[in-house]
């Protein structure tokens, strides 16, 4: 059973009298443990695809099965639960809660999952250690560098042990050195068996993935699978403990 | 996530948000502070008025029935037309009643007349001369400060003696003892045998201490040959008040020869009539007063609603993130409701805190205190205002689409 299975997915938006076809009849299968990059120019529909994959949005038509469950017709609260359990988001702008320290930011999904204080502290600390921030747990986002913030965000994405890590331009707000450190982190996570989907318009970033989906005008224009693992494509500048 | 965790997390977020916007939150809650302050003060004032009233009418005695020609309260002209031709109550009727009544502990006639009073160079232009008997000591609920009350022999013998109210005594005698002295009431000399303890005033209308008590027959002789009487009947006990009233009514009908088909040509008044009339008026005043002060609380609530809309708009992105990582609608709703409720509760605490010294000031005029109950209700109202006015903004936040919320800059 594939982890992700999209069958004839379409997403249309009504803008006044106009209907915009953001996605047209997309059929796609992603297996567990894959490392996929979704590429495409702006307006191609890649954000729409990411929103659907991340269960932030539901398709106008078609069927989306995530981990064996049909999520295409779920309501708001059911989708929230699926996101909490199955999806770990990493955003371009990090999207940490500014007034909370790293630990609380990482704990947040576990709070929503209903875990007790001690258990979630333990798991959150573990996740922060995995991204190399064991010594920064009580720092607030504005006391950390961009790279560190993105690591906190990745720890937050990891913490519930989700089926997919969904990263939207994860290096977009970072300098190239920090960016490649973050990509190394994803590389290691992928090697540990996590399923990773990165949405990007940078070829450098996409080259880390084993599979590149190119979106154009709401359809998958190309589906390239690479034999060669990603890390060798870009030089590793500083190995990070993961 | 269970509700306790939701509330704890909501409170944590709310307090963080309030701390981050201290100035804005304090300004927003100012309306609540003022609203709670005015509502609390209004409540305290109403309590004070009630107590002042009850204290004031206690001179009537809860167990004393007052028989008079008219009701204390004549509510309409029609009623007046119906009762205006009633016969006077006479002293003979009082005596007849006294002989036949079984359940009464004491029966006293009561008639009053305004007259000047003088002692040497000191004088009062007008005091209330009360013609009564020694029984008034029981029915009128008076206690003596000096000397004694009228004796039965003085009453039956119509002796020229009097008992002074405390104000009359201090006006005429300053610091000297009035006992044994002779005062001039109108043109007649009266020997002072006693002085009554201060009683205060009746509903702020007239002083109960500006009275002088004389034997009832002296009233005929000196001041008024045809006085209007009322009768004070003290029941054997408060529990037997109703039976006493029934007996009294029957006897009065018999004594005044009211035929069975006619209605009473007298009225039995009691403290209870005053209380119920007062309660009706006071209830209206309280309702109107609380409504008007409640309006300020309403305005405060609108301020909170406004600030909560701002807070939600400002944190659209945060809402998006929270939803993306698994916050349900209820979680977001509770988060913002807690914020609104906390702001209002803080405002309520400040309002109650300010109301307390203000009620201390009020105590100089009214017998009142701010009760814990009132403070508790005020805080409850503040909380409710927060929840009500925060609901719409919180609902908007809870229903936000995560995709749009995340896209918000």
Image: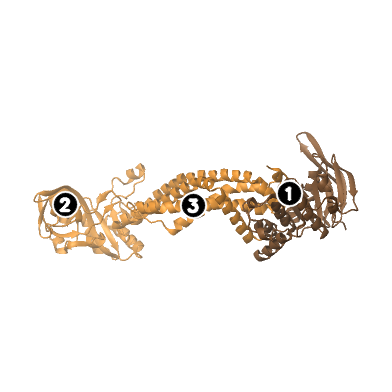
Chain colours: A brown, B orange
Parent chain of label 3: B
Q: Say which residue appears at 57% left-offset and 43% top-offset.
A: B306
Judged by depth in the image, the label closer to the viewer, 2 or 1, is: 1
Q: Are marks 1 and 3 on the same chain?
A: no
Q: How many numbered marks are there?
A: 3
Q: CA distance from mark 1 to mark 3?
A: 41 Å
Give the residue at mark 2.
B171
Residue placed most toward the observer, A200 or B363: A200
Q: Indicate the position of residue B389 as horizontal and vertical percent values.
A: 57, 47
Give the residue at mark 1.
A91
Judged by depth in the image, the label closer to the viewer, 2 or 3, is: 3
Residue placed most toward the observer, A174 or B202: A174
Q: Indicate the position of residue B374 as horizontal and vertical percent values.
A: 45, 56
Q: Earlier in the sequence, mark 2 or mark 3?
A: 2
The quadrant the N terminus of chain A occupies is bottom right
Question: Which residue of the protein is positioned furthest toward the top in this rendering?
Answer: A17
Q: Are marks 2 and 3 on the same chain?
A: yes
Q: Are marks 2 and 1 in contact (CB under 8 Å)?
A: no
Parent chain of label 2: B
Residue placed most toward the observer, B393 or A242: A242
């Amino acid at each position: 059973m594939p982890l992700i299975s999209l069958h004839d997915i379409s997403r249309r938006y009504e803008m006044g009298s106009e209907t915009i076809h953001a996605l047209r009849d997309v059929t796609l299968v992603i297996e567990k443990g894959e490392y996929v990059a979704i590429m495409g120019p702006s307006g191609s529909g890649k954000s729409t695809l990411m929103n659907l994959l991340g269960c932030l949005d539901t398709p106008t038509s078609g069927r989306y099965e995530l981990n064996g469950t049909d999520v295409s017709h779920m309501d708001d609260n059911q989708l929230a639960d699926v996101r909490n359990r199955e999806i770990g988001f990493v955003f371009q702008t990090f999207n940490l809660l500014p007034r909370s320290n790293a630990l609380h930011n990482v704990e947040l999904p576990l709070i929503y999952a209903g875990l007790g204080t001690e258990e979630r502290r333990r798991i959150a600390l573990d996740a922060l250690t995995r991204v190399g921030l064991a010594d920064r747990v009580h720092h607030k986002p504005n006391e950390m560098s961009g790279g560190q913030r993105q690591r906190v965000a990745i720890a937050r994405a990891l913490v519930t042990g989700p089926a997919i890590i969904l990263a939207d331009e994860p290096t977009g707000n970072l300098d190239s050195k920090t960016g490649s450190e973050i990509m190394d982190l994803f590389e290691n996570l992928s090697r540990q068996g996590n399923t990773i989907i990165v949405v990007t318009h940078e070829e450098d970033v996409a080259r880390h993935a084993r599979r590149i989906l190119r979106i154009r005008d709401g359809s998958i224009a190309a589906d390239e699978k690479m034999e060669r693992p990603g890390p060798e494509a870009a030089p590793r500048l500083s190995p990070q403990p993961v | 996530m269970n509700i306790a965790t939701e509330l704890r997390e909501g409170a944590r977020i709310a307090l963080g948000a309030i701390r981050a916007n201290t100035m804005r939150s304090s300004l927003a809650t100012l309306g609540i502070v003022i609203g709670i302050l005015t509502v609390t003060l209004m409540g305290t004032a109403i309590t004070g008025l009630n107590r002042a009233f009850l204290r004031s009418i206690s001179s009537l005695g809860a167990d004393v029935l007052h028989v008079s020609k008219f009701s204390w309260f004549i509510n309409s002209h029609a009623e007046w037309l119906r009762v205006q031709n009633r016969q006077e109550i006479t002293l003979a009727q009082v005596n007849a009643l006294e002989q036949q009544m079984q359940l009464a502990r004491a029966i006293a006639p009561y008639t009053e007349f305004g007259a000047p009073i003088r002692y040497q160079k000191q004088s009062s232009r007008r005091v209330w001369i009360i013609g009564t008997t020694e029984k008034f000591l029981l029915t009128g609920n008076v206690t003596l400060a000096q000397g004694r009350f009228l004796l039965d022999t003085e009453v039956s013998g119509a002796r020229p003696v009097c008992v002074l109210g405390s104000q009359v005594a201090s006006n005429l005698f300053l610091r000297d003892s009035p006992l044994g002295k002779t005062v001039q009431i109108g043109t007649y000399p009266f020997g002072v045998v006693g002085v009554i303890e201060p009683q205060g005033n009746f509903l702020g209308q007239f002083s109960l201490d500006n009275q002088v008590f004389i034997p009832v027959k002296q009233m005929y002789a000196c001041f008024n040959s045809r006085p209007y009487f009322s009768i004070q009947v003290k029941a054997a006990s408060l529990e037997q008040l109703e039976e006493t009233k029934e007996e009294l009514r029957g006897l009065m009908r018999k004594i005044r020869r009211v035929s069975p088909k006619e209605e009473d040509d007298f009225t039995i008044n009691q403290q209870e009539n005053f209380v119920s009339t007062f309660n009706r008026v006071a209830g209206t005043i309280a309702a109107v007063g609380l409504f008007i002060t409640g309006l300020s609380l309403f305005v405060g609530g609108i301020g909170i609603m406004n600030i909560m809309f701002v807070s939600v708009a400002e944190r659209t992105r945060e809402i998006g993130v929270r939803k993306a990582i698994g916050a349900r609608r209820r979680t977001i709703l509770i988060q913002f409701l807690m914020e609104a409720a906390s702001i209002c509760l803080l405002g309520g605490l400040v309002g109650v805190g300010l109301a307390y010294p203000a009620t201390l000031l009020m105590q100089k005029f009214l017998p009142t205190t701010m009760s814990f109950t009132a403070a508790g209700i005020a805080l409850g109202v503040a909380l409710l205002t927060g929840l009500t006015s925060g609901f719409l903004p919180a609902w908007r936040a809870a229903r936000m689409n995560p995709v749009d919320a995340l896209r918000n800059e």
